[in-house]
Amino acid sequence: GVGLTQGTVYLLTNLIVRATPGLLWYAIIGPVGLQAVAGLVWSIVALGLSPYLEHLFDLITPIRLSELANPNRPLLKRLASEAPGTFQHTLFVASLAEAGARAIGCNVELVRTGTLYHDIGKMHDPLGFIENQMGGPNKHDEIKDPWVSVEIIRKHVTEGLVMARRHRLPKAIRAFIPEHQGTMLIAYFYYQAKQRAEKGARVVKEEMFRYAGPIPQSRETAIVMLADSCEAALRSLKDATHKDALQMVKKIMRARWQDNQLVDSGLTRAEMSTIAEIFVQVWEQYNHKRIAYPKAAMNPNQVKTVKSVVSSN
């Protein structure tokens, strides 16, 4: 396309400028062909160099984001096999975040790709996270030490960054790993530690039970923080109404706002209200009602009997 355009422009320019009609085509056809070939060659060179330029200058393009979001990428394949619960959590968070990003005009491709990698650090200790325990014993009940447990939880951020750098993920994608947690309090183990401290002399410092940050620096990472926070709560709802689900989502978002997790993100209160509505809509799509099968349909013998009665009639 580029070569053809370049050649056509060159041809038209010469037709206008040159004044000798007899030798016009002879004089022009050669240079036009050269211009077309040159344009084609430069197009091929540009396409060939673009991946190297993206890595060299840490650029993110739609093509690169699409490649990174491919589920056959090594890190994503490992996540699916080594931490399947986390992978399923990631897919639902991605659905929420992508819909929220689209609703307020954010970079949807960046949000989708960043979300897919936001929890890769959980592969350092999959059973340390409840979604991978698959109904088995809770590792932290066996540890019985909130100070040890909180380090396992916090470590999924630092380990995630190590993995991301090792696999040369762009800086814009790496940002989702720490920023989706910000400096949030790991409340369960914090309050567990406070209860233990009341019985002994150990001091409990809140910063020991918070993530290291930074807090979200863009609307995109802020959306993923909100989606990640709301995902488990939405999944836990069974027969809740739209209003109940929306109230719960807004309560979670309000807590993040009051904890100053979103002050650097550029996200507004109005946008958060829009995102809350979208999250609930996505949850409703996943949680739609299904028709209960009659017991006879689950019993092959009864089904055969019904069929024979119908055919005899």
Image: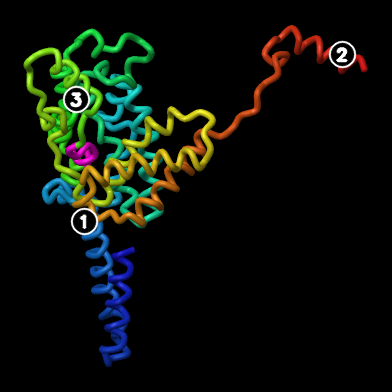
What crowding class fits label 3: few (fewer than 14 Cα within 10 Å), some (14-19), or many (20 or more)?
A: many
Q: CA distance from mark 2 to mark 3?
A: 65 Å
Residue visible at 11% across and 32% down in the picture: 207
Q: Which of the colour schemes (rainbow, by chain, secondary structure, one colour) is used? A: rainbow
Q: Are marks 2 and 1 in contact (CB under 8 Å)?
A: no
* Residue 64 visible, this orientation: no
Above or below, comparing residue 38 to residue 92 in the picture: below
Identify the residue position indicated by label 1 in the image: 46
- Residue depicted at 39% across the width and 32% down the height: 233
Which residue does the numbered mark 2 point to in the structure image?
309
Quadrant holding the C terminus: top right
| Type of the residue with mark 1 | Ala
One can see residue 227 in this view? yes
Q: Nearer the viewer, mark 2 or mark 3?
A: 3
Residue 83 part of the magenta-drawn span? no
Pair 2/1: label in front: 2
Residue 46: x and y in percent read 21, 56
Magenta residue check for 182: yes
Q: What's the magenta region?
A: 176-183
Q: Which residue was labeled with disc 3?
A: 190
52 sits to left or right of 301: left
Local secondary structure at mark 1: helix
Label 3 SS? helix
Amino acid type at mark 3: Tyr
Say whether disc 2 or disc 3 marks the residue closer to the N-terminus. Answer: 3
Q: Nearer the viewer, residue 113 or 38?
A: 113
Identified by mark 2, the residue type is Val
Earlier-in-chain disc, 2 versus 1 = 1
